[in-house]
Image (cartoon, rainbow, N blue to C red):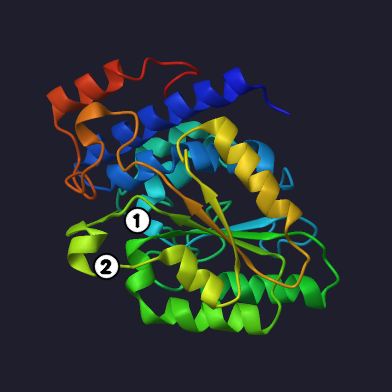
Amino acid sequence: MPDKKYLNDLVVQVRRDILRQVHKVNSGHPGGSLGCTEFLVALYQEIMDRNDSFKMDGKDEDLFFLSNGHISPVFYSVLARSGYFPVNELNTFRLLNTRLQGHPTTHEGLPGIRIASGSLGQGISASIGAAQTKKLNGDSHLIYTLCGDGELQEGQNWEAIMYAAGNNIDNLIVTIDYNKQQIDGATDAVLPLGNVRAKFEAFDWEVIDIEKGNDIDAILSGMKTAKEKTGNGKPICVLLHSVMGNGVDFMMHTNAWHGKAPNDEQLENALAQNPETLGDY
């Protein structure tokens, strides 16, 4: 099990990977990626029970599905630094005919990618299918998924949320990146979500808040609680109170960097705030 220093060092390194990927091609989504860095590092390094070798069938291991696929920079970095493919492949992000496309896809055969994602609103549905498959196969492992909060404005989510509770999908943990920002502004300005906790509870889900969504210790504690609540007849929702652009002061608390790459000067500034820890690619 990695120690906390290693986890925090890895968080910094993943931030550097994110920034360098989007800067190189002047394209991509750094804001949400930076906001979910601690969560995905914790998930892949300590929370999930996963196999060292990737198999598409996912038998006898926990599975993760990224619904908000535009945050592919953080997903690719965490996968690479968790051993799924060479770290230097991050150099190919968003280049033509490579495996690291702007939104994760499956036909390139990139280890760690189980579904194409980025067409928002579909991740919970896919995760429910995987969770039911686990149950049918007598596999006690868990399904994790990550969704954006603005993504909850998609109606398909609520059909899936109703279905999961109605069918006792209790081996599922859905985490909402609750940063209250989306591409066009604050979620409250675009289409208010109201009381998200109350909505999930009204659909008969168990809800857990991680108030410090960019703190490794808080994430580990909150997800441990989430895991303990599985198997009791209800699906689990985790509200991850994260900060968009976390770790880079001029990107934080704003939607401005949802889908904009830093220029040379901004990259230098951002990297200086995150000194190299484990080795760039």
Residue 243 percent location from the top left of the image: 35, 41
Amino acid residing under circle 1: His
Query: In the picture, residue 201 is in which quadrant?
Result: bottom right
Residue 192: give its label: 2
**Quick check: 187 above or below 52?**
below
Residue 43: give its label: none
Residue matched to label 1: 70
* Residue count near mark 1 (Cα–Cα under 10 Å), binned few <14, some 14–19, many ≥20: many
Residue 90 falls left or right of residue 111: left
Residue 44 shows up from this direction: no
Question: As rendered, which of 129 and 177 lies closer to the eye?
Answer: 177
Residue 27 falls left or right of residue 61: left
Q: The residue tagged with tag 2: helix, strand or loop?
A: loop
Amino acid residing under circle 2: Pro
Residue 269 falls left or right of residue 199: left
* Residue count near mark 2 (Cα–Cα under 10 Å), binned few <14, some 14–19, many ≥20: few
Identify the residue at horizontal 37%, vertical 15% (top origin).
275
Q: Nearer the viewer, mark 1 or mark 2?
A: 2
Identify the residue at horizontal 63%, vertical 47% (top origin).
223
The quarter in which the C terminus is drawn is top left
Residue 26 shows up from this direction: yes
Question: As rendered, which of 84 and 148 lies closer to the eye?
Answer: 148
Identify the residue at horizontal 74%, vertical 47% (top origin).
49
Residue 227 percent location from the top left of the image: 71, 53
Residue 195 percent location from the top left of the image: 39, 66
Q: The residue tagged with tag 1: helix, strand or loop?
A: helix
Residue 280 percent location from the top left of the image: 42, 22
